[in-house]
Image (cartoon, rainbow, N blue to C red):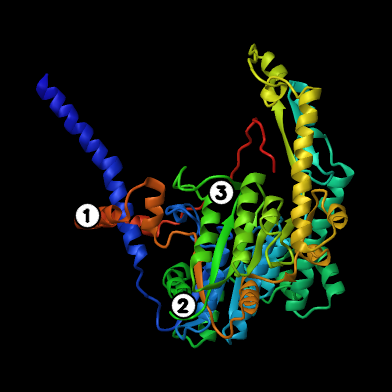
Amino acid sequence: MKQFLLTMAGVFAGLVLFFVLIPFLIIGSIIGAASNPKDATPAQAVLELDLRDGLPDQDPQNPFAAFGGSGLSVISVIETLRHAETDDKVKAIFVRLPEGGMAPAAADELRLAFLHFRKAGKPVWAHSQGLYPSGVVTSTYMLGAAADLLWMQPDSSFQAVGLAGEDLFFKRFFDKYGVRADYEQRMEYKNAVNPYLYSDYTPAHRESATAWMSSIYRTGILTAAIDRKKEPIAFIRLIEAGPYSAQEAAAKGLIDRVGQVRDASDALIARVGGKAKLADFRDYMSVALRTHRAGLGGKPTIAVIGAEGPIMTGRGGGGNPFSGDETVWSDDISDAFYEAIEDKDVKAIVFRVSSPGGSDTASEQILAAVKAARKAGKPVVVSMGTYAASGGYWISSQANEIVAQPTTLTGSIGVYGGKFALGEALSRFGIDVRTTAVGGEYANAFGLGQGFDAGQRAAFSRWMDHIYDGFITRVSEGRKLPVDRVREIAKGRVWTGVQARQLKLVDQLGGYYDAIDRAKTLAGIKGEARIKHIGVPSSPFEALERFFGVSSTSLRTLAAAGWIMGDPRAAAVLDEMAAARLRATPSGAAVLAPTPVR
């Protein structure tokens, strides 16, 4: 019996070693190599930038996110391109476009980077394997149109002919199964929960959606017309008369050439001299970013603080370390601002925001840190990404200046909150909800058994009014607009950057580097400035420390042990993992639970 137990213990220990420790050591080895990358760029390189896996706006906060996606972000790409402009090794950029749509503001940002790269005298060529009506495909086409040459694969389809959206409305489904959506909205354009309340678009919902979609579509098509040097009205008519085959698109001047990917990349290599080699953009980026972001000592510093995802109270570092989902944690962002405030070298702050909103209390905590930076004499310039709406606009509203892309979705100055009442639905399945409560009438207001009673609704409504009025006040103070004017343009309505600029909700249309330039001007910086990213782990080991609560020293030791213990089989596993190109498909889940105010 004793021998049996010893044998079982040995087997268990072996399984733990094989399934837990060895993979961790292998991953540690990979990250150890990634934390000290070597420049393997060919003497003459054409960088291949593959955009087909999609891009988040900012660098991921967790150490393993790259295993579930491209490993790129909008900010990392444009910073790498800025560095590559002055690198004699880099001769050109070859871009692989996605077949579907891109986030419009991401396409705007990348377009500016492409044009800046071309202005440095280096070509950008793009190749598409087809443009299909999935997402905002006109933004993908606009980005391709910003290249020196736009290729398409033979017999692929050019379907960038417009923009359409589709929503599912659940009201009749809920009525059939006894689910009650009990929500309050401020105001009529705050339509995030409309699919639960109605069976069709309300007039305000349809008006708002049509307005921002039209703005994004026209901006993308007119920008493409300018870049391709076409007369806008005729160009729009030509686009909308599609779809076309690749050959037809080329004959009509919508693209430049037809050919396979290899045809296009070989032609670009020949164009830059014939001795160049195709190099993976990500491999180059891992070295280039370290140099670009390090800057030069002794120079005045612009701090960059990033905020991407829904806004929540608390501090990051928990949850699934393999998830690519980003969250704006109020403690982390506030800490980053106070770190910048205390850093004597930091003269101004660029706050990069790409958030659809979230908790009002978390937003207020972050806004307080923005105001503290301004009070400390450090100007804050917001650079808006894909969206900076609702809570995303709340945290931006009192910056010195706001810079947005033409297609950034912003505004949504409003609030909603409520719950799903499931008592009747559950009772149909033999499940009865019973409540016990002590204290005031509002104590069980968010119970799921039944909707708000009259007293609870009145109290909840007052709370919603208080939050909405506070939002209006903050925007009025920050944008120096009369309260009545803010109420007129608020109402929960979403605006594009172009529309928001006309309404004075943003100050300037432009991208990340435009915000950097404005921050330098406001801080009185002449010449170059060092760019310092604050609030993100400076190495994969620090990120792991944050997620697992293990010291960086211990992690480095484990990684070194993994390297020492390696044999040819382990090396093969490392090679396989390094070569793997895992693709992530965005997904979401709906939870029938009390909804926080947003």
Q: Which of marks 2 and 1 is nearer the N terminus?
A: 2
| Whether residue 2 is situated above or below residue 595 in the rendered picture | above
Disc marking residue 295: 2
> Circle 3 sits on which residue?
585
Q: Which of marks 3 and 2 is in front?
A: 2
Q: Earlier in the sequence, mark 3 or mark 1?
A: 1
Q: What residue type is labelled 3?
A: Thr
Task: Label 1, secondary structure: give it.
Answer: helix
Q: Earlier in the sequence, mark 3 or mark 2?
A: 2
Q: What residue type is labelled 1?
A: Ala
Q: Which one is nearer the viewer's eye here, 500 or 584?
A: 500
Circle 2 Cα neighbour tier, 10 Å, few/some/many (<14 / 14–19 / ≥20): some
| Whether residue 4 is situated above or below residue 276 in the rendered picture | above
Task: Label 3, secondary structure: give it.
Answer: loop
Between marks 2 and 1, how big is the CA–CA gap?
Answer: 33 Å
| Whether residue 280 is situated above or below residue 197 in the rendered picture | below
| Whether residue 576 is situated above or below residue 436 in the rendered picture | below
Between marks 3 and 1, how big is the CA–CA gap?
Answer: 34 Å
> Circle 1 sits on which residue?
561
Q: Which one is nearer the viewer's eye here, 245 or 568?
A: 568
Tag 2 and tag 1, C-beta contact below 8 Å: no
Q: Can residue 194 be seen in this view?
A: no
> Residue 478, image x and y in percent?
74, 61
In which quadrant of the rendered image does the C terminus lie? top right
Task: Label 2, secondary structure: give it.
Answer: loop
Circle 3 Cα neighbour tier, 10 Å, few/some/many (<14 / 14–19 / ≥20): few
> Residue 307, image x and y in percent?
58, 57
